[in-house]
Image: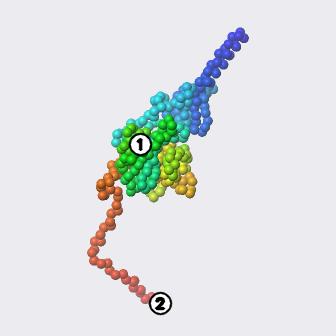
Amino acid sequence: MKIYLFALAGIAALLLAGSASAADRVVLKSGSEVTGEILKNDDKIVIIDIGTTVLRLARTDVLRVDRSGGATTRPDHASATTQPIEKSGPAWQLYRTAKLEPDTVEKKSDANAEAVVMVTSAGGQGSGFVVNPDGYVVTNYHVIANETRIKVTLFKQTDQGFENRHFKKVKIVALNPFEDLALLKIEDATEPLKYIYLGSMEDLKVGQECFAIGNPLGLTRTVSQGIVSTKNRNFEGRLYIQTTTDINPGNSGGPLFNLKGEVIGVTSMGYIYLGGLNFAIPCDVVKRFIENRDAFAYDEDNPNAGYRYLQPAGRRNPSSPPPGRWPQLEPTNR
C-alpha cells in the first residue's frame, strides 16, 4: 500500500513539474505576471487557469501573452504568423491600418524604425514616415515650405546595422499649410518600402504611454518616450495631442506611436526650454488630409498654387468722404 501511494505521489509530482515547466504566461501592463493554462485569448479577454482558480483578464490590461512554446501569441482569431493583420480599405486611401498587439517600446521601435525617414531641403531638415509600400511619405509643411528640391533618407536595417539610402527624386503631392501637413512621394525607389500603420483617436487615452522616432538636430533614429498629456489641446483653432514625449528641432514631421506601433500623431512642435510640453497633429487629421489630397494637390507649374488673400470689396460711393468735423458744443444753462 505504501509503495502504491509513493508511486501515485511520484506521478503527481512529475505531472505538476511538467505542467509548471510548460505553463503559459500573461504579462500585464502593470508589470505583474500570471502563469497557468490559457483557456481563451481574443481581442477582448484573456482567460487563464492558474490551478486554484480561473482568472478573466481584460485585453486592455494585458501587455502580451507568452505560450509555453516560447512564442508570443495574438488573439485566437489572429494569424499565427508574425505579420500584422491589415484591415482592408479602398485603393485611393493610400495609408494602411491593421490589427496590432501592444508590446514594449524596444520591440515596437525596432519594428518601425526603418519606415521613419529624414527629410532634407535647402531650408532645413526634419523627419517623416512612409505610409504605404509605394513610397508615400507624410511630414510637416514647415519642413519643406517654399522648397521644391527635397531629399529623403531612409535607414535600411541590415545584418551589419543601419544603411543610409538617399532618394533625390521626391515629388510634392499635396500641401496643407493650415494643418502643417505635407504628402511626398519617393519616385526613385527600386523596391517596395516598409511602411507604418495609422491608428485612431477613438482608442487614444489620456495617460497612456507613447513614443516618438525622429532625427532631432540631425541625430538620426532617436527614440523618446512619454505619455499622452491630453488628446485635444487647442492652439489657434487647431487641435493637438499634448505629450511629455520629447520633440526637438528635427523631430518635426515624424511619427508619434502608441504601444501597438500605430501612428497616433505627427510630431509638430514643442517648447525648447520647457520639458514635457510637446505637441503632435492627431492621426485623424492626417487621415483626412491623405484621403482628400486632391483638394490640396501641389502643381509647381500653376501660378495660383498655394493660397492668397482676397482684396476687400471696393467702395460703392466713388465721391470723397465728407471732411471730419468737431462736434458742436451746446451752451450749458446755469
Question: Considering only order in the chain, which callout, 2 or 1, is on the residue closer to the N terminus?
Answer: 1
Task: Give percent across and percent down for residue 171.
Answer: 36, 48
Location of residue 241 in the rendering, given as x and y in whole percent from the top left corner: 49, 50
Answer whether residue 262 is visible to the viewer in this image: no
Dot 2 amino acid type = Arg
Q: Residue at x 38, y 41 (%)?
A: 189
Task: Nearest to the eye among marks 1 and 2: give it.
Answer: 1
- 65 lies above or below 147: above
Q: Which residue is the extreme one toward the bottom?
A: 334
Indicate the secondary structure of the residue bearing disc 1: loop
The residue identified by callout 2 is 334
Disc 2: CA contacts within 10 A as few (<14), some (14-19) or many (>=20): few
Where's residue 301, x and y in %?
30, 54
Q: Amino acid at mark 1?
A: Val
Q: Is residue 12 above or below residue 97?
A: above
**Local crowd at mark 1 within 10 Å, few (<14), some, or many (≥20)?**
many
**How far from the left and from the top, in percent, is residue 190?**
37, 39
Quarter of the figure that contains the N terminus = top right
Residue placed at 54% from the left, 34% from the top? 64
Q: Which mark is residue 289?
A: none
Q: Quadrant of residue 192?
A: top left
Q: Which mark is residue 131?
A: 1
Q: Disc 2 on helix, strand or loop?
A: loop
